[in-house]
Amino acid sequence: MIEVIKFGAEWCGPCKMMGPAMNKLKEKYNIEGSEIQITDIDVDLNPEMASLHKIKNIPVTIFKIDGIEIKKVVGVLNMGKIEEHINELNLTK
C-alpha cells in the first residue's frame, strides 16, 4: 500500500494552498480497495504523530510504501507533483 501523508496546520498559509489538491486526491484514491491512501494530519491536533515523523517544518508530505517511509518532501506540492511521486512509488513496489 502507498500512503501519502501531508502534515500541516490550520494557521499555515502554504498548508492551506495544498488543501484543494489534497481533497481531490482523497476523492480519487480514498476508495474501498484502493492501494493508495491519502491523509492530512494537523500537527497541532496530533503532536505525537508529528514527533514520530520528526516534523520540523510544515507543510511536509511523506510518502510510504507498506508503512516504510520512502520520501519526505518539505513545501507546497500541487496535485500533479504529488501524483508524480505516487507514480514513482508504484514503479518501485
Image: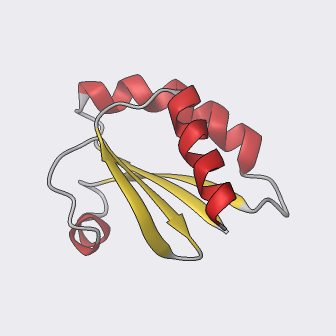
Q: Residue furthest right?
A: 33
- Estimate the x, y position of residue 79 in percent, counting from the top left: 56, 29
Q: Is residue 4 above or below residue 85?
A: below
Identify the residue at image location x=30%, y=57%: 45
Identify the residue at image location x=21%, y=66%: 54
Q: Residue furthest front?
A: 92
Q: Is residue 62 above or below residue 14?
A: below
Identify the residue at image location x=67%, y=69%: 1
- Residue 8 horizontal side relative to residue 56, left or right: right
Please tell me in which quadrant of the rendered image residue 85 appears: top right
Please tell me in which quadrant of the rendered image residue 37 appears: bottom right
Number of numbered callouts drawn:
0
- Estimate the x, y position of residue 49 in percent, counting from the top left: 32, 69
- Estimate the x, y position of residue 48 in percent, counting from the top left: 26, 72
- Residue 62 horizontal side relative to residue 24, left or right: left
Q: Is residue 93 above or below residue 66?
A: above
Q: Give the camera-side residue of 93 and 38.
A: 93
Judging from the image, the colouring scheme is: secondary structure
- Residue 26 horizontal side relative to residue 60, left or right: right
Question: Which quadrant of the rendered structure holds the C terminus?
Answer: bottom right
Please tell me in which quadrant of the rendered image residue 76 appears: top left
Identify the residue at image location x=64%, y=38%: 25
- Estimate the x, y position of residue 44 in percent, counting from the top left: 23, 54
